[in-house]
Amino acid sequence: MADPTPFPSDLAQVPEGERIPEAFGWAPAAWALACATFAQLTAFQPAKLDGGGALALGGAILGAVLLGAYEVRRRGHPKAMVRRGSALALYAKGRLDRQVEAGACQLYLRHPTRTWGPILMTGMGTLAAGSFLLPGGAALAPADRVTAGLAALTFAALFATIIRTRLFCEEVLLPYASGRGYQHVLIHKREVPRIFRPAA
């Protein structure tokens, strides 16, 4: 059982210095850009759109809007953790979600190839797409230049989010109240010792 140290039900009652805030990358925004790139490519293709093409275009636009809205929403309601004694509390949407033993939490361990592989691929994608925009490069129609620009932005956003989330942050695994599985919460690396420090 978790330490009985009481936690306020409202995060606003917890001093700012006690809070361990959730960190974010830019994955939803990057995938929204990917949807926008696909939509732009589909909308300006030379051939007239058939039924399937129109459906794909509509899906891409909807995906971009939903992913963009999700990015705004999650940043507006960040989670936070609070460590007191041997207990760790998770707050979601400003309210106490649950309390667990800090010792029951873990760090998510990822093989290095699952970090450096995506970094290299998205970095090369950024350079490849960006090369079409360089002066003296391939002669492109205006619509194609927009597509290349959106593609470069997409790869750059994915590159930046992987760098941030996998090199400068850690994923903490908090057990669910049911005891079945773990919830992943991303935090900055500097905050990790505050969660896994020995109980006072």
Image (cartoon, helix red, strand yellow):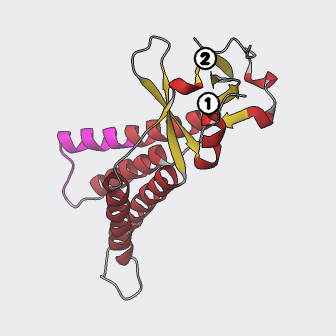
Quadrant position of the N terminus in the picture: top right
Q: Nearer the viewer, residue 186 or 31?
A: 186
Which residue is drawn at the image coordinates 22% and 45% (left, top)?
Answer: 53
Which residue is drawn at the image coordinates 51% and 24% (left, top)?
Answer: 104
Element on which disc 1 rests: loop
Q: Nearer the viewer, residue 128 or 145?
A: 128
Which residue is drawn at the image coordinates 58% and 26% (left, top)?
Answer: 102
Circle 1 residue? 79
From the image, give the main secondary structure of the stretch colored magenta.
helix
Q: Amino acid at mark 1?
A: Lys
Residue 57 among magenta residues: yes
For the residue carrying disc 1, how many other residues have a C-alpha within 10 Å: few (<14), some (14-19), or many (20+)?
A: many
Circle 2 residue? 97
> Residue 98's image quarter?
top right
- Say whether marks 1 and 2 touch (CB < 8 Å): yes
Q: Which residues lie in the magenta part?
A: 47-61
Q: Is residue 91 above or below residue 66?
A: above
Residue 124 among magenta residues: no
Rounded to the nearest angstrom, the CA distance separating label 1 from label 2 is 10 Å
- The answer to whether residue 5 is left or right of residue 110 is right
